[in-house]
Structure formats: structure tokens, C-alpha cells
Amino acid sequence: MTIGFVVAAAVSFLAAALSGKGFIPLLRRLKAGQTIKEIGPNWHKSKQGTPTMGGVIFITGMTAGLIAGAVALALSGAKTQEDLIWGTPYTMRLVGGFLMALAYGFVGFADDYIKVVKKQNLGLRAKQKLLLQILVAAAYLLSMEFAGALSTIVTVPFLGQFDFGIFYYPFSAFVIVGTVNAVNLTDGIDGLAASVTFAASAGFLVITGLLNSYGLSIFAASLCGALLGFLLYNFHPAKVFMGDTGSLFLGGAVAALAFGLNLPILLVPIGIIYIIEAMSDIIQIGYFKLSGGKRVFKMAPIHHHFEMCGWSEMKIVVIFTGVSVLGSAFAIYSVFWLLNH
């Protein structure tokens, strides 16, 4: 079954790499440049005007990879596998998960469009964005429920299984929305969110293989390939930023992989950088309000703190991605443990 995800990764990489060549000049012609906030590091001002909404590049790549991978898997004789039978929970996890990621990408696109085309720097209001994110999560969970693709029993490696009952749904919506926003916070310097998410999706690729989930293997492989294609343009110094279009899509994609496997707990080790980024922001804001203006970090999210400490963008990306690789390795070990107990 290797052929399916090899084709998916290769096609998604090529599609992203090629689409970037045409899409970035288009963004420049549309003057869809990023506005750098005054509160950011001073040296980021040199990035003013860099095209944003580049998430379209890896969304395009991943779409092409998913289609090519599914076709290759079917032609290889895997059409007897339940993953490829339309309407089964396995297929619905793949399709529903991708549609959820696309929906989040659309929310991000609307936000970016208002900011860079309409020249309204704040984009969607925070309440509007949060409401849309909750609605997308609810729609995904409902569709998976009707397809019989969800279980209220949450498996936690090394601890056992826990039935959340009716509380599973608000818990899951909270986790999905939290993941999406945490990935969004991680997107702050060249190549960071894409590199960290590549490590996360590579971890999921191994895990889906271990669990013989061929459809989700294609999903993870397509995401890996598309992100590599995007990094050709996003690695420091970035020629394009992913924008909220990309970061919200990536958050939805990572959440879709975890929930598609019915192992949302994997978001803790695999998404450890996302969690650290989000918690640093929460701690900074909370302490600032409680202390009357004092700060825990020089700047939040935490990647900016390390920038202010003198770390280069490259160093931050390498170290944060390395931590993500370690988190993914622990998640893989956890799944090995589950399979043997």
C-alpha cells in the first residue's frame, strides 16, 4: 500500500512547488502584502509588503496529492480495503477531515482578504472568527457522528480508556478550536509553522501506517509533500507568508488526523510546540493584567521571546522543529505501546 502515499507526497510537493511560481507573482500584482504590526520586533519591518495568503500554495498541493494518492491506491488493488469504500467511517474521516481543514482555510482567507485587499488591518473581529471556528468544529463532529466515525471513548496510552459520554462533543470542539488557534500563533517567523507542522504530519504518517489507516496515510503524506513544496518559498528569507489562510488550514488538518484516528490525545506530544506557543501567550496576557503591566516573557508568543534574546530565525525554526520531532517520536512510541497491550 506504500504506492498510495508515495504518489500522494510526490504529487503534492510538485503541485505546491509549481503553483508557488505562479501564485506569488499574482499576489504581488494584487498588492496582497503583509502589514507588519508596530508591536512586533523592529527587524520584522523589513518584511513589510511580503505577499501573504500563501497557504493557497500548500492547499492546492495537498488537494492534488490527495486525489493522486487515492487513485494510485485504488489502481494498486487496494480498492477492496474498507478505507476506499465510500460512506464507511474510514472514508468519511478522510473526506470530512479535509473538508474541515478547507473550511478553516476559508475562514482564514476571509480574514486575510479583509486585511490585505480591503486594507482593514484587523481583519475579522475576534468574536466573528471564534464563532466561525466553533461552527466548523461542530459541523465536523456532527458529520462524523452521523457517519459512525466517532467514539466518545478516549484512549490514553499508558493509562487506559475513558468514556466522556455527552461531554465528548464540547471537549472535542474545544480541542479542535484550540489546536487551530495554537497553530495560528506558531506562524510568526519564516518557515516556523510549516516546519513544525511538517514534523507533526510526518509523525502522523508513521502512525497511520502502523494502524493500517490507508486513507489517513494519504492525507498525512499529502500534507508532508505540500508543506515541503511551500517551504521552498517560505523558508528564511520568506518570499511569501502563509497568512491565516494557511495557518488555520494547518490547524484543521492536524486536528483532523488526530480525530480521524480516534486518538485526539496524540495532539499533546505531536503538537507540543503549538501548546507551548499558546500557553506562553495566555501566561503573558494573564500576568500582564494581574500584575498591572509586568511581563513574564520579553514578547509573546514564545518564539518572539527567543528572538528578543538574540536567537536567529533559523535557530528558532531548527530547535522548535527538533522538539516537534521528539514529540512525534514519543507519539509513535505510544502507539507501539497500544498495539502491544
Image (cartoon, rainbow, N blue to C red):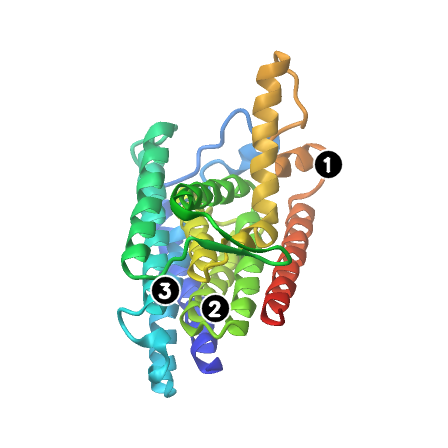
Which amino acid lies under the numbered mark 2 shown in the image of this protein? Answer: Ala
Separation of marks 2 and 3 at Cα, in angstroms: 12 Å
Q: Is residue 140 in view from this perspective?
A: yes
x then y, percent, for residue 146: 27, 57
User: Left of 196 or right of it: where is 100?
Assistant: left
Which numbered disc covers residue 221? Answer: 2
Q: Residue at x 50, y 64 (%)?
A: 224
Is residue 264 shown left or right of residue 292?
A: left
| Residue 31 visible somewhere in the drawing | no
- Circle number at residue 94: 3
Dot 1: element? loop
Q: Earlier in the sequence, mark 1 or mark 3?
A: 3
Mark 2 or mark 3, earlier in chain: 3
**CA separation in Å, label 1 and label 2:** 35 Å
**First along the sequence among labels 1 and 2:** 2
Q: CA distance from mark 1 to mark 3?
A: 42 Å
Looking at this view, is 262 or 99 the one in front?
262
In the rendered image, residue 22, in percent from the top left (x then y), is placed at: 36, 58
Assess whether mark 3 and mark 1 are in contact (beta carbons under 8 angstroms): no
The label shown at residue 310 is 1
User: In front of the other: label 1 or label 3?
Assistant: 3
SS at mark 2?
Answer: helix
Percent position of residue 109, x then y: 33, 44
> For mark 3, does the 10 Å Cα neighbourhood hold few (<14), some (14 to 19), or many (20 or more) residues?
many
